[in-house]
Amino acid sequence: MNRNDKASEWRAPGAVVLISCYELGHQPLAVASPLAFLREAGFRPRAMDIAVEDFSEEKIANAKFVGISVPMHTALRLGVEVAAKVRETNPECHICFYGLYGLLNKDYLLENGGDSTIGGEFELPLVKLVQGLSQDSGATQVPGAATREHTSGPYLEKIPLLKPEREGLPALQAYAHLVNGENHYPAGAVEASRGCKHLCLHCPIPPVYDGRFFIVPQDKVLEDIEDLAAQGARHITFADPDFLNGPSHALRVARAMHERFPALTFDFTAKVEHLIKHEELLPEFREYGCAFFVTAVESLSDLVLRHLDKGHSREDVFRTVKAARQARVSIRPSLVAFTPWTSAQDYFDLLDFIEEYALIDEVDPIQMAIRLLVPPGSYLPGSKQMERYITELDAENFIYRWEHPDRRMDKLHEEALILAEDAAARQEDAATTFMRIRELAADVLERPEQARAKAVFAPDRIRPPRLTESWFC
């Protein structure tokens, strides 16, 4: 077969397939964006999202290249299982893991089914890899990609982004919805920026982006929002790691979206320290349709916050909640309820905080069962405060395992996780689940005086707006 014939085969429909495994309940942006780049380059890729549809052997059977998106830990674990199915269906195709967790776990992935991994701003390296493979032109020498023969660090050059291509993805109605009172509205996700300028020790972003972030041009963000609105979106999630890394840009985007689509609501994620620094923006965000924001509170223990290098304190958390209340914007704190340094009293402090600030419907019960995740490649395993608690690297699950010095805390985590997951599956009232977790903690931690809640939550209370997907990683 000559080079032209081979190139033609690679440009046939379905020769390139991109697979998403999980993207926080949203239609996968990490597939939609490279789809646009590949199509502009003359390829005719197909997409699959196993979060909402069955694995399709038919789509894989004739593929020459399969890219598996791994932007987070859950997606990576599912992605390895998908890769095994791909290899069984089509032993000869090239399998590439791309996204934040690709390069962080490249050694394991390349030894267990993967042919390449790509990290950082992945779209251009992905296209160059596919082009090289289609032409036998040294595809392994792609900046940002790692293969068995060649290793490159993450690609961190600013790229000319295209409007994400969402045609061929499952319908928006299959994904997370905004719940507001009795109403459920389809929700879509866009990016206004990528990367993060902060270096929190437990976060997987700093080892890849090293404190850098990139602005997505406003016109591209609005074009993507327009596509989502045409699909029926009534709510937009800004999926940036931190929407306020570029506060002026964030405000301009929110204002422009509101001017063009005044019925749309939105949510975003931002660090506590940014919310304090820019708290004067919250009323304006509210005016433009902000329904809620997520912020990584993690803990109320100043010791834990210092060990994670979070950049905020316990008092900063209280100030942020008060700012949200004054702006009439719902705040949804994410937590790391279990760390090696979290004491029994720290855990009850979190429960008291949720009650006293009436956050019972803004902190998903699963947050009270989240255990510190220590992924390979993050800065935390090498820190002095963490190394003595680590017991082993569990390469197959992409984590370092650790033990709490108080074994009761490990037991509480295990039982609280089972309780919260079961309650979520049954759609139990969050207040009921909270009370049960409090009773469980009082029992396991041997503090019977802490079993009773201090607040009363009426079953007919007004719940703040939220998404139907409650996971954050």
Image (spheres, grey):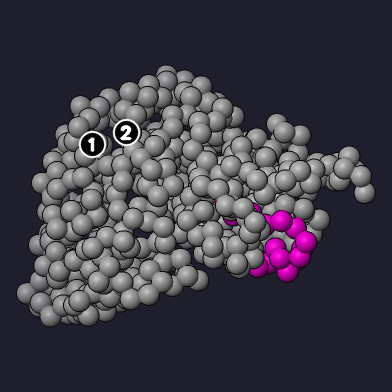
Residue at horizontal 93%, vertical 49%? 1
Which quadrant would residue 265 be assigned to in this image?
top left
For residue 275, which numbered disc appears in the image? 1
Q: Magenta span has 77?
A: no
Which kind of residue does numbered mark 2 sit on? Leu
Give the Cα separation between the discs numbered 1 and 2. 8 Å
SS for dot 2: helix
In the depicted view, which residue is nearer to us: 163 or 122? 122
User: What is the x, y in percent for residue 207?
Assistant: 40, 50
Q: Is residue 154 above or below residue 472?
A: above
Q: Give the range drawn in magenta.
A: 84-98
Which kind of residue does numbered mark 1 sit on? Leu
**Viewer can see residue 353:** no
Residue at horizontal 39%, vertical 37%? 212
User: Is 225 displayed left or right of 58 in the figure?
Assistant: left
Q: Which residue matches tag 2?
A: 244
Outermost residue, right side: 1
Lower sequence index among marks 1 and 2: 2
Quadrant housing the C terminus: bottom left
Crowdedness of circle 2 by 10 Å Cα count: few (<14), some, many (20+)?
Answer: many
User: What is the x, y in percent for residue 104?
Assistant: 47, 56
Residue at horizontal 10%, vertical 78%? 448
Looking at the image, do the residues carrying marks 1 and 2 touch, with CB atoms under 8 Å apart?
A: yes
In the depicted view, which residue is nearer to us: 468 or 318? 318
Which quadrant would residue 416 be assigned to in this image?
bottom left
Residue at horizontal 41%, vertical 57%? 377
